[in-house]
Image (cartoon, grey):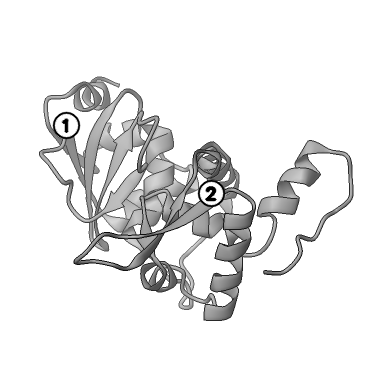
Amino acid sequence: MSPRRSYDQYCSAARALDVVGDRWTLLIVRELLSGPRRYTDLHADLPGVSTDVLASRLKDMERDGLTTRRRLPPPGAAFVYELTARGRELLPVLQALGTWGGPDLGARRPTDAVRAHWFALPLLRALEGEGLVEVRLEEGDFHVYVGAQDGPAYGEGPAPREPDVRLVLNSDTWVAVGRGELSLADAVRDGRVEVTGDGTIAKGLREA
């Protein structure tokens, strides 16, 4: 485990960057917001990170109290990494960064990787209330836990139970929402998002 580098500045922003300012750290947090993940799963959803760097960042994050590592009970018996309460407090930080960086998305480059669940964070910003939302994109399905205070913020694949609302939209629409060019409410009004369900979130989207 490498010693922590520091800006040696008596400033809370500098102290925060001492912990999360290294390349890949916040993107690892993004992935772990979906719940416990195995090393191989993290590596698969962080295209471009080397195995050495990923292992080093995970060790640093555990040292700094952002993550824990535990072994699953049989028959799994694999090690998983998960966020601590301190690590999960970075959710609004990532959401704010996503809002700030949305206008810089531009057109997707040939070298850009994409995962459906990367849309989870901007979607959580756009939804109000509490409930389980399933999202169907051309790139795949994922689900988000709107208003959840504990546990995962989102998950890959279909919802584990009947969702309160189901959203179906195409890539052009979610890119426009992610860039901040189109609000989710406007996309629903324009018929670019199909909304099914009778929960409060579904009603709120239809009535917005």
Residue at image coords 27%, 63%: 139
Q: Which mark is residue 175?
A: none
Q: As shown in the figure, which amino acid type bears the numbered disc 1?
A: Asp
- Mark 1 lies on a secondary structure that is loop
Q: Nearer the viewer, residue 200 or 32?
A: 32
Q: Residues within 10 Å of mark 2 (few under 14, many from 20)?
A: some
- Mark 2 lies on a secondary structure that is helix
Depth check, mark 2 against mark 1: the one in front is 1
Residue at image coords 12%, 41%: 161
Relative to residue 47, is residue 9 drawn left or right?
right
Report x, y in % for residue 58: 55, 64
Q: As shown in the figure, which amino acid type bears the numbered disc 2?
A: Gly
Q: Nearer the viewer, residue 205 or 140?
A: 140
Of callouts 2 and 1, the N-terminal one: 2
Relative to residue 160, is residue 53 drawn left or right?
right
Q: Tell me if residue 25 can be seen.
A: yes
Quadrant housing the N terminus: bottom right
- Residue denoted by label 1: 164
Q: Nearer the viewer, residue 64 or 175?
A: 64
Report x, y in % for residue 169: 24, 49
- Residue denoted by label 2: 102
In three-dimensional space, the C-alpha distance between marks 2 and 1, rounded to whole angstroms, equals 27 Å
